[in-house]
Image (spheres, helix red, strand yellow):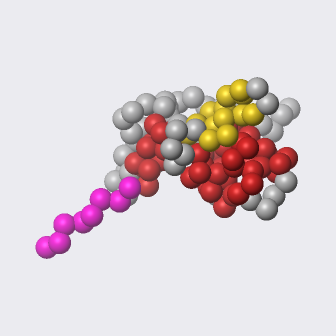
Amino acid sequence: MSKQAAPLALIDLTAETPCCPPLTQRRLPAETAAVLAPAFKALGDPVRLQLLSMIASADSGEACVCDLTPAFDLSGPTISHHLKTLREAGLVDAERRGTWVYYRAHPAILRQLAALLSVQPTPVA
């Protein structure tokens, strides 16, 4: 029997409205945590966090792998591995154009993750 579980599809990470209230307002259900955890895990690596930042902040809304690779002192295959991890976590999408691959961030998913981690200021008495 395989140790890899079937992917859960309990929440729509691409929805414009938050999937759940912030962690500080209500306990996160286990099923929702299982869906969101791969995205947070992917962002737990400094290189992947930088790659996502470069892609999400690109002027045209997308970044070519040819522009991403030189920014790191890593081999092309290592960068490709990190980009694959971001794709599998649903944080970016990729499109091949000729010999190059262009990456775009999924803003709706980033908003979902940000909303979950947002902290509302407490009123001062």
Q: Is residue 66 above or below residue 47?
A: above
In the image, is residue 123 part of the stretch drawn in magenta? yes
In the image, is residue 24 part of the stretch drawn in magenta? no
Prevailing SS of the magenta stretch: loop
User: Is 17 positioned to the left or the right of 98 in the image?
Assistant: left
| Image x and y of residue 15, in percent | 43, 31
Can residue 90 be seen by looking at this rendering?
no
User: Is 62 positioned to the left or the right of 28 in the image?
Assistant: right
Mark count? 0
| Image x and y of residue 44, in percent | 64, 58
Can residue 99 be seen by looking at this rendering?
yes
Q: Is residue 72 above or below residue 12?
A: below
| Image x and y of residue 103, in percent | 64, 37
Residue at the image point whose x is 50% and y is 34% from the top: 13
Residue at the image point whose x is 72% and y is 34% from the top: 101
User: Is 74 positioned to the left or the right of 64 in the image?
Assistant: right
The stretch in magenta equals 118-125
Quarter of the figure with the C terminus: bottom left
Residue at the image point whose x is 37% and y is 46% from the top: 21
Q: Nearer the viewer, residue 60 or 41?
A: 60
Quarter of the figure with the N terminus: top right
Q: Residue furthest left?
A: 125
| Image x and y of residue 5, in percent | 73, 34
Residue at the image point whose x is 43% and y is 55% from the top: 117
